[in-house]
Amino acid sequence: MTARLQLAHITKRYPAVVANSDVSLTVQPGEIHAVLGENGAGKSTLMKIIYGSVKPDEGSVLWNGEPVHVRNPQEARALGISMVFQHFSLFDTLTVAENVWLGLDKHLTLAQVTQSITAKAGEYGLDIDPQRPVHTLSVGEMQRVEIIRALLTNPKLLILDEPTSVLTPQAVEKLFVVLNKLASEGCSILYISHKLHEIRELCTACTVLRGGQVTGVCNPQDESNASLSRLMIGAEPPQLEHHERQAGEVVLAVRDLRLPRGDQFGVDLDGVTLEVRAGEVVGIAGVSGNGQKELLYALSGEDTRAQAPMIQVFGRDAARLGPAQRRALGVHFVPEERLGRGAVPTLGLAHNLLLTRDDAIGRGGWIRVKTLQQQAKDIIARFNVKAGGPDAAAKSLSGGNLQKFIVGREIDANPKLLIVSQPTWGVDVGAAAQIRGAILALRDAGCAVLVVSEELDELFEVCDRLHVIAKGRLSPSIARAQATVPQVGEWMSGLWTSGQGDMHAQA
């Protein structure tokens, strides 16, 4: 059988790093092939070479046995290659349908594309409104748009980068059925994920990268999570220790928070009530686009429309306080969007510290640059961030390494209340264990932590209590020890039973 794709001795060098070194990879027709590696291992660069957005310095590419030089994504799509990037390529001012239309056959009308989006979204369980402007979408909803756009090209090779991070467990199962169906029809799939159990369940081949080089090729169904971790990072990730402890005083109290949506495509917050105490981690699960963005804006101080009693920090009314005033109370925040909200792309890592910290600013507003650089160096070392030093531009880091730096920046500020959204999105298993361990260490030191995540495994690993958000309403809390994945998955669909037996958030 002729291979669908063959990469032979691919090398790509950048001034500060060799991203790929002598990489070879073969994908057969109808094969679901995992590409596994830690952050900065060279996975994204390799995928961009296949998709034509990066040119290799050395090596060759064969497509169905024939040598090809894919010069740009348009040529890749003409061959039948589609890709969902980790960092999305969408125009904020255009609608979902207009963004999808840009990458499709120009003979199609916008109305036809809109109809196709609705049909494909229903088929794949990826709910999205084609008429919504992209700037109103959450990061998770943008990922759905990218997946649908790729599927509408009817690809012969589909490259998926972390595709399940926005889905309920039930929707993940449905997507796996669809991917297996695509594979049975001859479509090859390159699947990048840091969820080792997904790779073992779905994929029949796996190429492992470390430091830009291939360190192993295997059938993941014959491996364990531990053996895949050893291939990927050279060791098994450290086991987290979740010590039982008595929670302290109430740090964050949200009381019957009601906020109308900020735009026509947003979600109304309807009676949200929760508490986070010192020395505990509280989690909020839910499918992207159910009010997480609106709640986080209200808690971070970006949205100050709430009435004074609705949000309290250490018993003080905080609803009308801005982000800087909340930081003065010890509140720190990690947004879900790394580039643009968590960091200024063109600024160096050291100067990005100034977004949320002012301890390197001296009298008269002068910036103590050496102090700032040392702080950045300490965070880079503590959180094992792969970067070209404290002055490296934020946009030069891989997604996972930038995530480690942003989380490290907020943890290093010694917060009394840390609100973190998607703490390990796109982060490899070793780095994820490190970030989760740092969250638990904060909790053990008496910090109150609120984690908003679509990774159920993550929430079950770090949280003491869980809520689920659906359609702008928040479920009662449930102790982690009493929660189950099927139950939380059901609640994510919008239906739950309170302790008193009444029903809330019904669809």
Image (cartoon, rainbow, N blue to C red):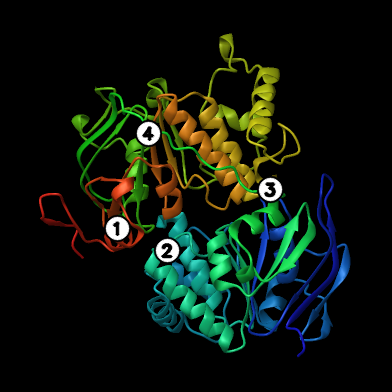
**In the rendering, at what x and y percent does residue 185 appear?**
57, 89
Q: Are marks 2 and 3 in contact (CB under 8 Å)?
A: no
Q: Residue at x 55, y 26 (%)?
A: 412
Q: CA distance from mark 2 to mark 1?
A: 23 Å
Q: Could you say whether the residue bearing mark 4 is in a helix, strand or loop? A: loop
- Judging by the rendered image, the residue that carries numbered circle 4 is 244
Q: Nearer the viewer, mark 4 or mark 1?
A: 4
Q: Viewed as shown, does residue 72 lie left or right of 479?
A: right
Between the residue at mark 4 and the residue at mark 1, the CA separation in whole angstroms equals 44 Å
Q: Amino acid at mark 2?
A: Leu
Q: What amino acid is at disc 1?
A: Gln
Image-quadrant location for residue 78? bottom right
Amino acid found under the numbered disc labelled 4: Glu
Per the image, label 2 sits on a secondary structure element best described as: loop
Front-most of residues 360 and 60: 60
Per the image, the residue denoted by label 1 is 264
The three-letter amino acid code for the residue at tag 3 is Ala
Cα distance in 3D space between marks 2 and 3: 29 Å
User: Which quarter of the image is occupied by the N terminus?
Assistant: bottom right
